[in-house]
Image: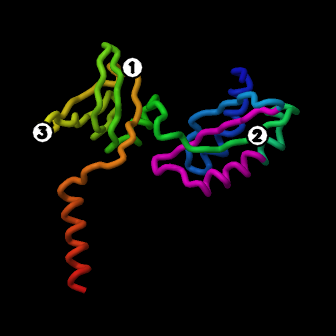
């Protein structure tokens, strides 16, 4: 997709996406046989519901049909949220990753896997998991030190003491009833 087409699509679609309280993360047009696929990735701090993607897809389709931004050729429109393994490239991506485990590739060649605790304008406060029974440690990481970052998928996460207590309280209440 040419820069001009990308810029034109962004100008056309960003107000529509923003009106839904979403961020327009990415626009790509790729060939797929005789057609093209227009993929629009949207996100928000609360995530994106499937129904929201479907509604936005209809609105974007109407907007594109009323313009010549995609030209006369056939295309397939996909409106989606980012995958769990997408790179963290914007400040807002890091904010959305608070509480999540992230794998960092550092400019000095090092690698770090840590949980994001807080984010500010300069960097992140992290909790680095302990090794072999050691307690986790805190660490500060400036954005300037980060070459790449991606959220790590966690299939099972130990709950903290508060989560366990809340669950025990609910179980005790159920037994008393």
Q: Which residue is mark 2?
A: 76
**Real-space CA distance between mark 2 and mark 1, rounded to the nearest whole angstrom:** 34 Å
The reply to whether the magenta stretch includes residue 22 is no
Q: Which residues are magenta?
A: 35-61
The reply to whether the magenta stretch includes residue 57 is yes
Which quadrant is the C terminus positioned in? bottom left
**What residue lies at 64% left-to-right and 38% top-to-bottom?**
40
Q: Which mark is first along the chain, 3 or 2? A: 2
Where residue 80 sits: x, y (%)? Answer: 61, 44
Q: Which mark is first along the chain, 1 or 3? A: 3
Q: Which mark is first along the chain, 1 or 2? A: 2
Q: Nearer the viewer, residue 124 or 18?
A: 124
Badge 2 marks a residue whose secondary structure is strand
Residue 123's quadrant in the figure?
A: top left
Badge 3 marks a residue whose secondary structure is loop
**Real-space CA distance between mark 2 and mark 3, rounded to the nearest whole angstrom:** 51 Å
Which quadrant is the N terminus positioned in? top right
Drawn side of residue 36 relative to residue 72, left or right: left
């Amino acid at each position: 997709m040419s820069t001009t087409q990308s810029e034109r699509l962004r100008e056309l679609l960003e107000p529509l996406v923003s009106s839904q309280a979403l961020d327009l993360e990415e626009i790509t047009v790729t060939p797929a046989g005789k057609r093209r696929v227009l993929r629009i990735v949207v996100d928000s701090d609360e995530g994106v519901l499937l129904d929201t993607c479907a509604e936005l897809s209809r609105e974007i389709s109407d907007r594109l049909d009323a313009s010549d931004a995609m030209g006369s050729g056939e295309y397939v429109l996909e409106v989606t949220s980012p995958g769990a393994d997408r790179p963290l490239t914007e400040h807002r991506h890091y904010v959305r990753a608070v509480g999540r485990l992230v794998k960092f590739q550092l400019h000095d060649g090092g690698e770090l896997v840590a949980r994001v605790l807080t984010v500010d304008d300069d960097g992140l406060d992290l909790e680095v998991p302990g090794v072999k029974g050691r307690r986790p440690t805190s660490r500060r990481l400036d954005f300037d030190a980060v070459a790449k970052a991606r959220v790590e998928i966690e299939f099972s996460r130990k709950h903290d003491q508060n989560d366990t207590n809340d669950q025990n309280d609910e179980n005790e209440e159920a037994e008393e009833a």
